[in-house]
Image (cartoon, grey):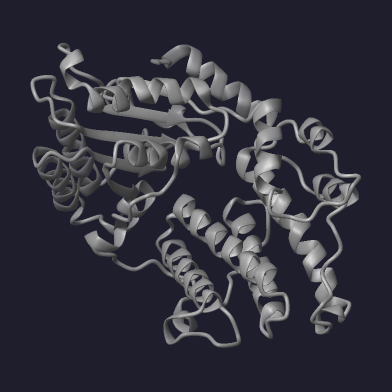
Amino acid sequence: MSASSELEKAATSYAIEAVRLDKQGSKGMAITMYQRAIETLLKLVQLYPDYGLNKVYIQRAMAYQERIRAIQGVGGSFEPQLGEEKPTEEETTATPPTEAKKASFDELVLKEKPNVKWDEVIGLEQAKKAIKEAIVYPVQRPDLFPLGWPRGILLFGPPGCGKTLLAAGVATEIDAAFFSVDAASIMSKWLGEAEQNVARLFATVRKTAQEGRPAIVFIDELDSLIGKHSSEVGGEVRMRNQFLKEMDGVIDKGKNLHAYVIGATNKPWDLDWPFIRRFQKRILVPLPDYGARLHMFKLYTSHLTLAPDMDLYELSQISEGFSGSDIRDVAQSAHLSVVGEFFESGRAKDKQAQPRPIAMEDFRGILEARKPSVSIDMVASYNKWFEAFKAL
């Protein structure tokens, strides 16, 4: 298989997985897969500028980016169709549904091994330090921890700031089995059999840890699962009680298993106290500071052709308040805009022609046209909750 065919296959695989997760309502994981599809398509266009379907790939990448913005609540309700040319049979039918349907345990628990290195988790030094102390060091030298170690880790903060990335990074660091579930999907798709599936999930995790391999359960949108509810039906109460029971089994100080539960939430104030106290580490994952934003702009533009007037230091200053995913979207938007302009001009027919370098004005235009996805009031709310419940 040629390199171009491998890239096409990878992009299709990411897109199909993104749409599947999108159908389930697994927002965070769907966004990650859409972004991987975009990156692969853009890499294909860059490596093979004379490829006949490049215009289609650019259109697909722009559609996926629009869908990401829609999921984040900053765009329209566009739902991508996975291509008009050379679609696979699975692609053709893989479109987000209008109605939710029951999903199985295997559909809702992703077991794909993450491949995220610590140096890919930009900034967040305090969060990384707390996670290393709670998970990495006990795995490396359990004999140095006679009092045991934390098994419940709560990551909270604004959306798009790296909570999922942190969980994936630590799983890679300790070569852990990684079980990723979306709490909103559990509530909407498992109701009626949620207790059995929660029990099955934790039984699998304990078995993995007992066999000598660290295991991590990552629960996204944790507030959907264990948040405060003014009225609950019996199934929800039983499922929440089952989750409490399973959490107690994992964090039992008498058992030195390397089994961990990492929960992520954008709404920590919606969590019930019985659940909060089971997460011995409660870590704020904040918006990136100036240094982190600069590092991100350097990373996301490292494979792009930039004009001489590009000033990443200025971009880092004028993007204050933007999340990590916001900055990634800005870089992608600037790139897509220039490549789209190239195809619209008709110059792509010239096999030797290349898009113009991305200029500072392209980035300024994108930054002026969009606002940060996190408001000042939201940041204040996170800091207030952190002061009340932090446990590093």
The location of residue 138, given as percent across then percent down, is: 24, 23
The location of residue 251, given as percent across then percent down, is: 18, 26
Query: Which residue is at the front of the view, 9 or 344?
Result: 9
Instruction: Say whether residue 257 is left or right of residue 219.
Output: left
The location of residue 132, given as percent across then percent down, is: 36, 24
User: To which quarter of the image does residue 327 belong?
Assistant: top right
Query: Which residue is at the front of the view, 261 or 72?
Result: 261
Q: Residue at x 69, y 74 (%)?
A: 59
Residue 31 visible? The answer is yes
Query: Which residue is at the front of the view, 74 or 216?
Result: 216
Q: How many marks?
A: 0
The location of residue 116, given as percent across then percent down, is: 44, 44
Q: Residue at x 68, y 26 (%)?
A: 291
User: To which quarter of the image does residue 45 belong?
Assistant: bottom right
Quarter of the picture containing the N terminus is bottom left
Seen in the picture, residue 92 relative to 125 is either above or below; the reply is below
Residue 77 visible? The answer is no
Q: Residue at x 53, y 27 (%)?
A: 124
Quarter of the picture containing the C terminus is top left
Seen in the picture, residue 391 relative to 41 is either above or below; the reply is above
Instruction: Say whether residue 345 is left or right of residue 190.
Output: right
Instruction: Say whether residue 151 is left or right of residue 143.
Output: right
Q: Residue at x 17, y 40 (%)?
A: 213
